[in-house]
Image (cartoon, helix red, strand yellow):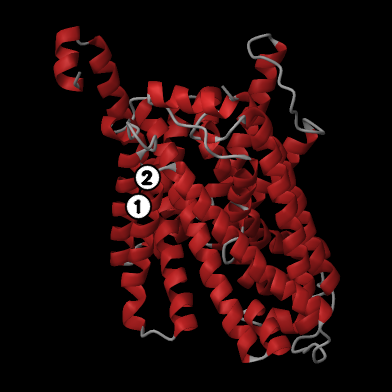
């Protein structure tokens, strides 16, 4: 029996996750988790802060270097613990249950679910602009996308991964057309609406530009959430992370080169929709229509990715006895966290309908990179355990350790501090919302301990057979 077939048989017999995601699908998950709508919009913000073409490309190259270090870090962590849940598992094992729970709590309450709502509405907006449908269709289209993709992922990781593959390829095709047109066609001379002069302080300007750049590069870590469903995760997860991040860095640099070649640094800084403006100048109205469709497809693929991976974190939390027991159960046939997928969809739809997702996401824009930095710090714990003989030595190792992880942690802290300084009130609200998870954690831990101490007959009645 082949290794994948053996894994399938094991999954069917013990009710665990089934390994159905190969290397190609893993790479598509990484790329799809990074590329959303950011590369179509954020380059204008970067150009506004650094002014010149060289510094614009330099900012994206520097951010790509940070993302690549992150891929190395998550690759080693994934090889050490190839379990579903990603950062939740690493934080729990290295620093204890509370920080891990707060990570999962934040994802469920607002980060993942708020992103699902926001991206679904973004998908609806671009779809309406693409098709010419009336704005009354916005909310039904957004909710319909959440329901459809949640349903696909309910029935197995393979349908979800195949959906991801299709829409990741489509978004790459859209970007390839953008880049190809920009580099091969000789359109009108770039528009210079803002003087393209170096900023007064290059260091400060690059630092400010790194915030939107790093947010655009975020997302590679989500593939670790489904590590338990990858075929040969110890080998394929690090490969998928590196190949995916390197591919995205190349795409991002080429896209920005296209924007600069077509619009110029000043025109890029003044643009509210760089991709549409660039392709519109090169191909006319048809180019704008094409890129609008491309953004719609890109956001749909990103939406699928978040819906696919995030329930694995909630399931891991519940399996530890820190959330509703039914959230820990996997579907007996599909081997998916079916209850967690349904719960996530219901909460995301509620956020979509009430329109509260925007505020929630504004409150926690710093949280992703806070988790990135904390997760990178777990690597030092695992390396120390390895030296003491308390953990096995792994073959895949972060190059340049400990300097490279320290640089990554510094970059993460910079984003957190920068986001907090830009809106202290929102950061305070986000911190309070995350802090609200502490009493929730204490409740579930106390309940778990109570069940553990209860007589067997009572525990059977309370907890079920």
Q: Residues within 10 Å of mark 2 (few under 14, many from 20)?
A: some
Residue underneath mark 2? 155
Residue in the image at 73% along x and 59% along y: 207
Tell whether 372 sits left or right of 191: left
Quarter of the image with the N terminus is top right
Above or below for 195 versus 358: below
Q: Nearer the viewer, residue 283 or 357?
A: 283
Q: CA distance from mark 1 to mark 2?
A: 7 Å
| Residue 199 position by quadrant | bottom right
List x then y, in percent, for residue 285.
Answer: 61, 91
Please report the residue visible at 54 percent of the width from the left and 76 percent of the height from the top. 293
Q: Residue at x 46, y 64 (%)?
A: 119
Residue at image x 77%, y 59%? 250
Mark 1 crowd level (few <14, some 14–19, many ≥20, 10 Å Cα): some
For label 1, the SS is helix
Residue 262 image offset from top left, x and y in percent: 77, 82
State left or right for residue 197 relative to residue 263: right
Quadrant housing the C terminus: top left
Residue 284 horizontal/vertical position (percent):
66, 91
Q: Which mark is residue 151?
A: 1
The front one of 23 and 80 is 23
**Is label 1 in contact with label 2 (beta carbons under 8 Å)?**
yes
Q: Is residue 42 visible?
A: no
């Amino acid at each position: 029996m082949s290794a994948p077939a053996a894994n399938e048989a094991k999954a069917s017999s013990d009710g665990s996750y089934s390994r159905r995601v190969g290397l190609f699908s893993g790479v598509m998950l990484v790329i799809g988790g990074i590329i959303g709508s950011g590369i179509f919009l954020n380059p204008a913000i970067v150009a506004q802060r650094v002014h010149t073409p060289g510094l614009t490309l330099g900012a994206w190259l520097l951010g790509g270097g940070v993302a690549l270090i992150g891929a190395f870090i998550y690759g080693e962590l994934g090889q050490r613990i190839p379990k579903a849940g990603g950062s939740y598992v690493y934080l729990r094992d290295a620093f204890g249950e509370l920080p891990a729970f707060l990570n999962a709590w934040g994802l469920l309450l607002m980060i993942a679910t708020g992103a699902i709502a926001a991206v679904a509405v973004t998908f609806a907006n671009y779809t309406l602009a693409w098709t010419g449908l009336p704005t009354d269709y916005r909310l039904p289209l957004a909710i319909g996308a959440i329901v459809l993709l949640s349903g696909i992922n309910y029935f197995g990781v393979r349908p979800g991964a195949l959906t991801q593959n299709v829409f990741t390829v489509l978004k790459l095709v859209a970007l390839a057309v953008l880049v190809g047109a920009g580099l091969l066609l000789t359109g009108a001379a770039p528009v210079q609406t803002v003087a393209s002069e170096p900023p007064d302080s290059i260091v400060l300007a690059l630092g400010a530009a790194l915030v939107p750049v790093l947010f655009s590069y975020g997302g590679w870590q989500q593939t670790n959430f489904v590590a338990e469903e990858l075929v040969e995760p110890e080998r394929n997860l690090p490969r998928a992370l590196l190949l995916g991040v390197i591919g995205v860095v190349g795409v991002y640099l080429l896209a920005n080169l296209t924007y600069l070649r077509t619009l110029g640094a000043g025109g890029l800084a003044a643009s509210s929709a760089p991709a549409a403006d660039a392709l519109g100048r090169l191909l006319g109205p048809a180019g704008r229509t094409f890129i609008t469709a491309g953004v719609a497809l890109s956001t749909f693929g990103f939406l699928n990715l978040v819906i696919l991976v995030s329930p694995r974190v909630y399931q891991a939390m519940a399996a530890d006895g820190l959330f509703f027991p039914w959230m820990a159960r996997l579907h007996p046939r599909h081997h998916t966290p079916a209850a967690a997928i349904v719960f996530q969809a219901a909460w995301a739809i509620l956020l979509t309908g009430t329109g509260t997702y925007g505020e929630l996401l504004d409150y926690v824009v710093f949280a992703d990179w806070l988790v990135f930095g904390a997760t990178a710090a777990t690597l030092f714990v695992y390396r120390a355990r390895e030296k003491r003989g308390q953990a096995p030595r792994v073959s895949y190792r972060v190059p340049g350790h400990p300097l490279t992880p320290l640089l990554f942690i510094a970059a993460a802290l910079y984003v957190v501090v920068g986001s907090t300084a830009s809106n202290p009130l929102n950061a305070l609200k986000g911190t309070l919302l995350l802090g609200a998870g502490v009493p929730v954690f204490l409740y579930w831990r106390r309940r778990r301990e109570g069940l553990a101490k209860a007589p067997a007959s009572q525990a059977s009645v309370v907890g079920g057979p």
